[in-house]
Amino acid sequence: KAGVTQTPRYLIKTRGQQVTLSCSPISGHRSVSWYQQTPGQGLQFLFEYFSETQRNKGNFPGRFSGRQFSNSRSEMNVSTLELGDSALYLCASSFDPLAGGELFFGEGSRLTVL
Amino acid sequence: QKEVEQNSGPLSVPEGAIASLNCTYSDRGSQSFFWYRQYSGKSPELIMFIYSNGDKEDGRFTAQLNKASQYVSLLIRDSQPSDSATYLCAVIEGKLIFGQGTTLQVKP
C-alpha cells in the first residue's frame, strides 16, 4: 500500500516569509503527527491531529500551526520564518499513536531559511 | 530535565559484539515504549515496542524495561555493519516523545 507522502521535499525560503507543508497519510490512518528534526535537538514534537482535531501540541511558538482535513490529509504552516526554522519536517501517520500504534514516517520536507 | 534522554554517542562496537543502547524517561505514568531506527538520510522506522517490565526478544534485538528505575534499553546481539544507524527511544507521555537518539557504529 502507498506510504506517507510529503510535499514539497525541498524548499528554500527567506526570513519573514511563510511556508505550507503537506502530508498525505496511509489510507485508513486517522492520526497525523508532525515533528521537526535538527542535528542539535533531534526529533521535536510539533502537533498531532486525529480525526480533524488537534489532540496534542508541542512547545513551539504560535507561528507553527496545522490542520487536518476530512480525508486525513494534513498541512502545517510556519509564518514569519526565522533562520532557526531551517530543519527537516517529518510527518507520520498512524491508526492511533496514543494507543501504541506504529508511526509510519514520510520522507520529510527539508526547509532552508536564508 | 528532558522528558526522554539518550546518550548521543557515537557508540562504536566491533562486528559480532553486543551493542547496548539506553534511554531514561521522566514520566512515571508512561506505559508504552518504542525503539525506532533511523539510517542516515532516511526516516525513522519502528523496530521494537515494549509495554511490560522485563525483556522482550525479537531476533537479534532485545528490549528491556524497568519501570521502577524509569529506563528502557535495547540490546543488539551479533552486531552487523548494517546495524549502523541512529536509534531513537520513544515514550508515550500524553504524546509520543522521542529522545535525541544514539548513533551506533558497527565496525567490520
Image (cartoon, coloured by chain):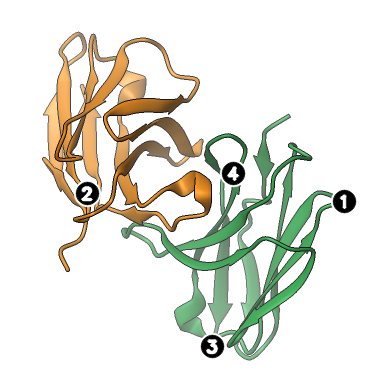
Chain colours: A orange, B green
> Dot 1: within a 10 Å radius of its alpha carbon, few (fewer than 14), some, or many (20 or more) residues?
few
Under mark 3, the amino acid is: Pro
**The label number, if any, that marks residue B92 in the structure image:** 4
Determine crowd level at label 4: few under 14, some 14-19, many 20+ residues with C-alpha closer than 10 A: many
Report the side of B69 relative to B55 (left or right): right
Q: Closer to the N terminus: mark 3 or mark 4?
A: 4
> On what subunit does the disc labeled 1 rest?
B
Q: Place residue A39 in its image quadrant.
A: top left
**Nearer the observer, disc 3 or disc 4?**
4
Rendered view: B15 above or below A63: below
The residue at 25%/46% (across/down) is: A108
Reading the image, the residue beneath label 2 is A25
Q: Amino acid at mark 1?
A: Ser
> Between A98 and B90, which is closer to the camera in this rendering?
A98
Please name the amino acid that badge 2 sits on: Pro
Q: Chain of mark 4?
A: B
Residue bearing mark 1: B69
Question: CA gap, disc 1 to disc 4?
Answer: 17 Å
Disc 2 packing (10 Å; few <14; some 14–19; many ≥20): many
Is A54 placed above or below A9 here? above
Subunit of label 3: B
Which residue is depicted at the point 61% across and 60% down? B10
Q: Are marks 2 and 1 in contact (CB under 8 Å)?
A: no
* Mark 2 element type: loop
**Residue type, label 4:** Ile
- Front: mark 2 or 1: 2
Quadrant including the C terminus of chain A: top left
